[in-house]
Amino acid sequence: MITGLCDEYPKLLARHRELFVAVLLIFIFLCALPTTTYGGMYVVELLNDYGTGNPILFIVFVEAAAVCWFYGAERFASDVQKML
Protein backbone atom coordinates (compact mmCIF):
# COMPACT_ATOMS: atom_id res chain seq x y z
CA MET A 1 0.00 0.00 0.00
CA ILE A 2 2.80 2.39 0.89
CA THR A 3 4.76 1.69 -2.28
CA GLY A 4 1.68 1.93 -4.46
CA LEU A 5 0.66 5.31 -3.06
CA CYS A 6 4.22 6.66 -3.20
CA ASP A 7 4.51 5.53 -6.82
CA GLU A 8 1.15 7.04 -7.71
CA TYR A 9 1.86 10.42 -6.09
CA PRO A 10 5.65 10.85 -6.23
CA LYS A 11 5.70 14.65 -6.02
CA LEU A 12 3.51 14.71 -2.94
CA LEU A 13 4.81 11.70 -1.00
CA ALA A 14 8.41 11.19 -2.14
CA ARG A 15 9.76 14.10 -0.14
CA HIS A 16 7.82 13.17 2.99
CA ARG A 17 7.88 9.37 2.80
CA GLU A 18 8.93 8.86 6.43
CA LEU A 19 6.16 11.14 7.67
CA PHE A 20 3.61 9.41 5.44
CA VAL A 21 4.64 5.96 6.72
CA ALA A 22 4.50 7.17 10.33
CA VAL A 23 1.01 8.64 9.91
CA LEU A 24 -0.22 5.50 8.17
CA LEU A 25 1.16 3.24 10.89
CA ILE A 26 -0.39 5.38 13.63
CA PHE A 27 -3.74 5.23 11.80
CA ILE A 28 -3.55 1.43 11.49
CA PHE A 29 -2.55 1.17 15.15
CA LEU A 30 -5.51 3.28 16.26
CA CYS A 31 -7.89 1.24 14.10
CA ALA A 32 -6.58 -2.02 15.60
CA LEU A 33 -6.52 -0.75 19.20
CA PRO A 34 -10.19 -1.57 19.98
CA THR A 35 -9.48 -5.26 19.34
CA THR A 36 -7.18 -5.33 22.41
CA THR A 37 -9.84 -4.22 24.91
CA TYR A 38 -12.32 -6.41 26.81
CA GLY A 39 -14.80 -5.96 23.98
CA GLY A 40 -12.15 -6.77 21.40
CA MET A 41 -13.40 -10.28 20.83
CA TYR A 42 -16.82 -8.82 20.02
CA VAL A 43 -15.26 -6.36 17.55
CA VAL A 44 -13.35 -9.18 15.86
CA GLU A 45 -16.53 -11.26 15.72
CA LEU A 46 -18.40 -8.35 14.09
CA LEU A 47 -15.62 -7.98 11.52
CA ASN A 48 -15.73 -11.71 10.80
CA ASP A 49 -19.50 -11.76 10.42
CA TYR A 50 -20.11 -8.55 8.49
CA GLY A 51 -16.75 -7.62 6.98
CA THR A 52 -16.30 -10.58 4.68
CA GLY A 53 -18.30 -12.62 2.26
CA ASN A 54 -20.51 -10.70 -0.14
CA PRO A 55 -18.73 -7.34 0.11
CA ILE A 56 -15.39 -8.96 -0.75
CA LEU A 57 -16.97 -10.91 -3.60
CA PHE A 58 -18.53 -7.71 -4.95
CA ILE A 59 -15.22 -5.82 -4.78
CA VAL A 60 -13.40 -8.61 -6.62
CA PHE A 61 -16.09 -8.66 -9.30
CA VAL A 62 -15.90 -4.89 -9.79
CA GLU A 63 -12.10 -5.02 -9.98
CA ALA A 64 -12.21 -7.80 -12.56
CA ALA A 65 -14.79 -5.91 -14.61
CA ALA A 66 -12.69 -2.74 -14.46
CA VAL A 67 -9.55 -4.56 -15.60
CA CYS A 68 -11.41 -6.16 -18.50
CA TRP A 69 -13.08 -2.89 -19.45
CA PHE A 70 -10.08 -0.55 -19.31
CA TYR A 71 -7.14 -2.87 -20.02
CA GLY A 72 -8.82 -5.52 -22.13
CA ALA A 73 -9.44 -9.13 -21.30
CA GLU A 74 -7.15 -10.49 -24.02
CA ARG A 75 -4.22 -8.24 -23.03
CA PHE A 76 -4.72 -9.14 -19.36
CA ALA A 77 -4.84 -12.88 -20.13
CA SER A 78 -1.71 -12.53 -22.26
CA ASP A 79 0.11 -10.72 -19.42
CA VAL A 80 -0.92 -13.37 -16.89
CA GLN A 81 0.29 -16.08 -19.25
CA LYS A 82 3.65 -14.32 -19.60
CA MET A 83 3.97 -14.05 -15.82
CA LEU A 84 3.19 -17.73 -15.32
Image (tube, rainbow, N blue to C red):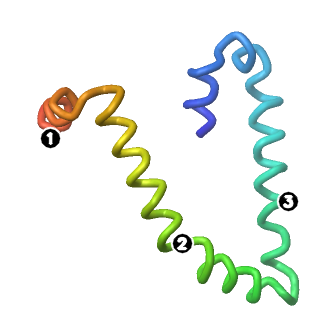
Picture residue at 69% right of the left edge, 82% below the top: 46
Please say if 72 is above or below 64: above
Q: Which quarter shows the C terminus?
A: top left
Q: Which residue is label 2 attached to?
A: 52
The label shown at residue 1 is none
Distance from disc 2 to disc 1, alpha carbons, whole Å, reads 29 Å
Mark closest to the chain's N terminus, 3 or 1? 3
Q: Which residue is mark 1?
A: 84
Secondary structure found at label 3: helix
Label located before the other in sequence (3 or 2) = 3
Residue at the (62%, 77%) spot, across then down: 50
Q: Quadrant of residue 10?
A: top right
Q: Where, quadrant-wise, is the N terminus in this rendering?
A: top right
Question: Tag 3: residue type?
Answer: Leu
Q: Is residue 65 left or right of residue 37?
A: left
Q: CA distance from mark 3 to mark 1?
A: 39 Å
Q: For numbered disc 2, what is the local secondary structure?
A: loop
